Amino acid sequence: MADEPLLRLGERHVWNFWRNQEEVYEVPYEQILKCYWNRIDQVPHPDILPFLHMAGFGYVSMIIQGAKLNPSLISALVERWRPETHTFHLPSGEATITLQDIVYQLGLLIEGHAITGTTKDNWFLLGRELLGVDPVDLDGGRVLITWLDQHFTDLPDDASIQLKEQFARAHILRVIGGILMPDKSRNKVHLMWLRHLRVLSKVGKFRWGSTVLAFLFWELCKATDPSKHVIGGCLLLLQSWAWFCMPFIHPTLHQPTPYIFPLIRRWTTPLSHVGLLDCQRNFRLLIDKNDEIII
């Protein structure tokens, strides 16, 4: 019996779908995914920085503001993603985001205990215990990110150690829900992550970086379905990885900066997109015609 092909999605993959659409209707076809992240505009309070570093979230917490997401670029990358191999199929071969990229791009830990657990709990009591405030408007265990911003922005000068730890947990939740693992709600984060933030000195013993990468891969796989119109996950990571690996598609830095850590912070300076048309078809052509991939 002949071996079954590895790439077996066929018409269920967006790459094949758009090519067939263009052949049938003889017009350019684009399907731009909706891409979201929830930006953080202020650096963490100096008094909670030691707790964030203790938890392994010190570097990633410095990713504020950040670059604007380019949905056309991200949609073009999704077309190249193969769920069967978890790699991008490019003219020069296969490439993918690795755990090493997670360390360099985000500054997250990739070794330690796996993050596991149930999505069922008394989220109200857990929030009261670890945040010190009763969560409101819970949606299946998810709380509004704006609620976190409202209650955990101004740390008193005479704050106790307990209050500083509560602010640190809230900031980590904010980073998880807004940058690292945003879902398609755009503005909510699940309180299930709090269970792993109970003892901040032990938070860094979990594989947060691996979890972020697995979540992004999951979202990429789902987004290859032609019926999908929204994608979640750490899209800032995806975009930054693509800009570093494919110099022919990244914007120009107004003030070129040296490589800073984590690398994703390089794109927080003013950027120029002159010469890079915001068009999915143009990104397809650029990727097709260039094999200058830096891995």
Image (cartoon, helix red, strand yellow):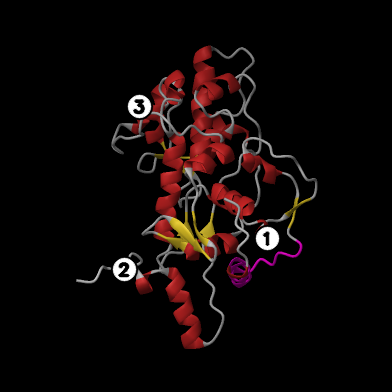
Mark 3 Cα within 10 Å, few/some/many (few <14, many 20+)? some
Residue topped by disc 1: 248
Residue 117: x percent and y percent?
30, 34
The answer to whether residue 206 shows anywhere in this view is yes
Q: Nearer the viewer, mark 2 or mark 1?
A: 2
Q: Secondary structure at mark 1?
A: helix
Q: Magenta stretch containing residue 130, yes or no? A: no
Instruction: Name the N-terminal-most of marks 2 and 3.
Output: 2
Mark 2 Cα within 10 Å, few/some/many (few <14, many 20+)? few
Mark 1 Cα within 10 Å, few/some/many (few <14, many 20+)? some
Image quadrant in which you'd find residue 106: top right
The answer to whether residue 147 shows anywhere in this view is no
Residue topped by disc 3: 125
Kindly identify which numbered label has been placed on residue 5. 2
Instruction: Name the N-terminal-most of marks 2 and 1.
Output: 2
Which region is colored magenta? 274-287
Could you tell me the amino acid type at mark 3? Answer: Leu
Q: In terms of depth relative to the viewer, which is nearer, 294 or 80?
A: 294
> Which quadrant: the N terminus?
bottom left
